Amino acid sequence: MSQVTDPTDPADPAEPVGPPTDTPDPPAGGALPGPDGLPRCPWSLSAEDYRAYHDTEWGRPVRGDRELFERLTLEAFQSGLSWLTILRRREGFRAAFGHFRIATVAAFGPQDVTRLLADPGIIRNRAKIEATLHNARVLTEWPEGRLTDLIWSRAPGPRPAPRTTAAIPAVTPASTALAKDLKREGLRFVGPTTAYALMQACGLVDDHLADCHVRAGGHPGSG
């Protein structure tokens, strides 16, 4: 893969990056049956990778500083790109970034940056790579659990389930506040759109559509 030079802004691009946006929705934007007949959010139907991610991961609560550092990093790398691009490289990212152990990434130096820029298993964007190392160094100064507590402190209360994809926002007051919190603490590539994508992916909000079988199944992030 050639080096990615997508113009990403630490302040966040305007393009929504919550549920993957590279899958066209039907006019109504409601849940659609998958190959097994179960209704799903439309974005999950374009690829098997999406369907598995939608069914088993997206919207389920994630806690733990390492786990949230990984997801925050991947959401930042996804900014401006298809989520499928990141999903299919996730194992490559984990291998390249020491499985997102914060202390390990914080210790990366110039040789590691060179290594990462040559690694075809990830998105080779210098600004995002350097931001990841910077963020890890900031987080090593935090007590264990602080990142988890900070992110989950911005989880909003229950709200009605969206019936169509048109009802799902790209940015909310809570994601704007979370982005400000993270930036105030010195983290980079954490704009409000990326923050909302993190909130969706990690179960702070449940944006599975009302008729989606995952929500109906009562997964831990529903409500």
Image (spheres, rainbow, N blue to C red):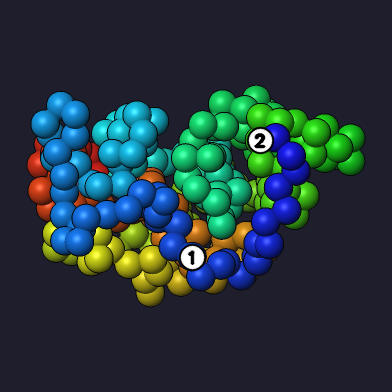
Q: Residue 108, can we see it? A: no
- Under circle 2, the secondary element is loop
Q: How many marks?
A: 2
Q: Residue 27, can we see it? A: yes
Kindly identify the residue that appears in the image at 42 percent across and 51 percent down.
22
Would residue 138 appear left or right of 158 to someone viewing this image?
A: right
**Mark sitting on residue 47:** none
Nearest to N terminus: mark 1 or mark 2: 1
- Under circle 1, the secondary element is loop
Image spot of residue 44 (x, y percent):
30, 41
Image quadrant where residue 66 sits: top right
- 89 and 34: which one is in front? 34
Residue type, mark 1 in image: Glu
Q: Which residue is mark 1?
A: 15
Image quadrant where residue 6 sits: bottom right
Kindly identify the residue that appears in the image at 89 percent across and 41 percent down.
110
Would residue 210 appear left or right of 109 to someone viewing this image?
A: left
Image spot of residue 36 (x, y percent):
15, 26
Q: Which residue is mark 2?
A: 122
- 199 and 155: which one is in front? 199
Kindly identify the residue that appears in the image at 80 percent across and 33 percent down.
118
Q: Where, quadrant-wise, is the N terminus in this rendering? A: top right
Mark 1 Cα within 10 Å, few/some/many (few <14, many 20+)?
few
Would residue 55 appear left or right of 211 to someone viewing this image?
A: right
Q: CA distance from mark 1 to mark 2?
A: 21 Å
Image spot of residue 127 (x, y percent):
75, 54
Image spot of residue 45 (x, y percent):
28, 39
Kindly identify the residue that appears in the image at 73 percent across and 53 percent down.
5
Mark 2 Cα within 10 Å, few/some/many (few <14, many 20+)?
many
Residue type, mark 2 in image: Ile
Circles 1 and 2: CB atoms closer than 8 Å? no
